[in-house]
Amino acid sequence: NLDTSICNGSSITINGITYNSNNLTGTQFLSSISGCDSTVNITVTEDPLLFSVIDTIICNNDSILINGINYGTNNPSGQEFFVAPNGCDSTVYITITSIPTASFSLDTTLCTNESLIINGTIYDINNSAGQEIFTASNGCDSTVVINVTFNQQPTVTSNFSDTTICEDDTITL
């Protein structure tokens, strides 16, 4: 008896007869030089198709390296082939979903003597714009673009230099 296995979709030829998924068993009669006949029962087992699936979610602009290929936003799907321990091909089907970066704008107005602290950065008349990056609840980056506008303090002038003001008096400007 001859028992052997082949990879899915392949074949083996024994004594001129091809065995594959359509022809897994057979009997062959062999003659030796001395004239004795031998009967060989052949059983071929086709190994199952080996595959796995990688279906994952990553942050925008991140990537995953699989078999030397970067998968991510610009290359979200594909298949990679490996050799399994039995010597047959193994296929990995890859699907990557990228979470878009969350981006927000904070536009506000302050007086020239005021400041705003965001994420440890002081925004004031000397530093009125910037970008802060936070980690969102999904673990990905979240960007806040900050623009601060400053109102000028008014200049008040008077011509009251010749006016005497007593306690409890009022002046209307």
Image (cartoon, rainbow, N blue to C red):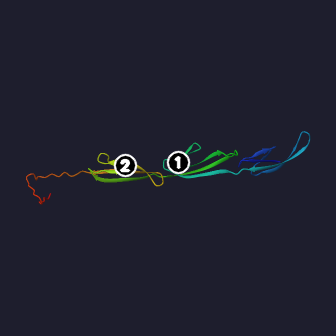
Q: Secondary structure at mark 2?
A: loop
- Callout 1, which amino acid? Gly
Question: In x, y percent, where is residue 55?
Answer: 57, 53
Q: Secondary structure at mark 1?
A: strand
At 64% across and 48% down in the image, what residue appears?
91
Mark 1 / mark 2, whichever is N-terminal:
1
Question: In x, y percent, where is residue 144?
Answer: 39, 51
At 75% across and 48% down in the image, what residue appears?
5
13 and 47: which is toward the camera: 47
Above or below — where is 61 with respect to 168?
Answer: above
Separation of residues labelled 1 and 2 (CA atoms) = 32 Å
Above or below — where is 57 with respect to 69?
Answer: below
Q: Is residue 121 left or right of residue 162?
A: right
Question: In x, y percent, where is residue 49?
Answer: 68, 51
Q: Local crowd at mark 2 within 10 Å, few (<14), some, or many (≥20)?
A: few
Q: Which residue is mark 2?
A: 120
